[in-house]
Image (spheres, helix red, strand yellow):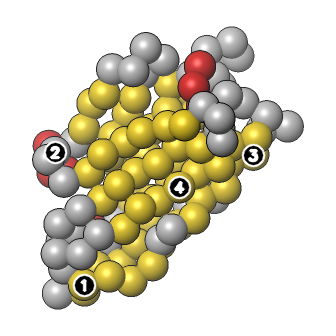
Amino acid sequence: QVRLVETGGGLVQAGGSLRLACAASGIAVAFNAIGWIRQAPGKERKLVARMGRSGEIVYADSVKGRFTISRTANTNTMYLQMNSLEPEDTAVYYCLVESATSDRSYWGQGIQVTVSS
């Protein structure tokens, strides 16, 4: 059974930093594509960052230079380091793992990030 558990969200002032973590079980983050998605109030879900199986990375234009996606094989955890946060970054953030073997995608439960101005 695949399980993704997110931690690290919360309330931060504009200009501050947060680090989201997503601990995976039942699937290896190191061998599958991973991503972070966010959904702001009243808006659609949008891709924030994605790392392919081979390590290639794509960021949304709005977070380039501020956010960094990474993963650690030994703890089977993926991360999103968020710096220079802006009120526009306020959203529920979801981690995502795309299984290469089953063509399924697995989602975390979502975690709130709120950036005050």
On the rendered structure, is 64 left or right of 8? left
Q: Is residue 31 left or right of residue 8?
A: right
Q: Which residue is mark 1?
A: 13
Q: Residue 96, position in %: x, y?
A: 54, 40
Per the model, the C-alpha gap separating discs 4 and 2 is: 19 Å
Residue at 70% x, 16% y: name it: 102
Which three-letter amino acid code belongs to the residue tagged 1? Gln
Q: Measured along the vertical axis of the image, is residue 19 above or below residue 60? A: below
The residue shown at (72%, 30%) is: 27
The earlier-in-sequence mark between 3 and 4 is 3
Mark 3 and mark 2: Cα distance apart in space: 28 Å
Q: Provide the residue designation for mark 3.
A: 3
Pointer 2: what residue? 64
> Which dot, 4 or 2, sits closer to the camera?
4
Would you identify the image quadrant in which residue 87 lies? bottom left
Q: From the image, tell me which residue sits under label 4.
A: 21
- Between disc 3 and disc 2, whose residue precedes? 3
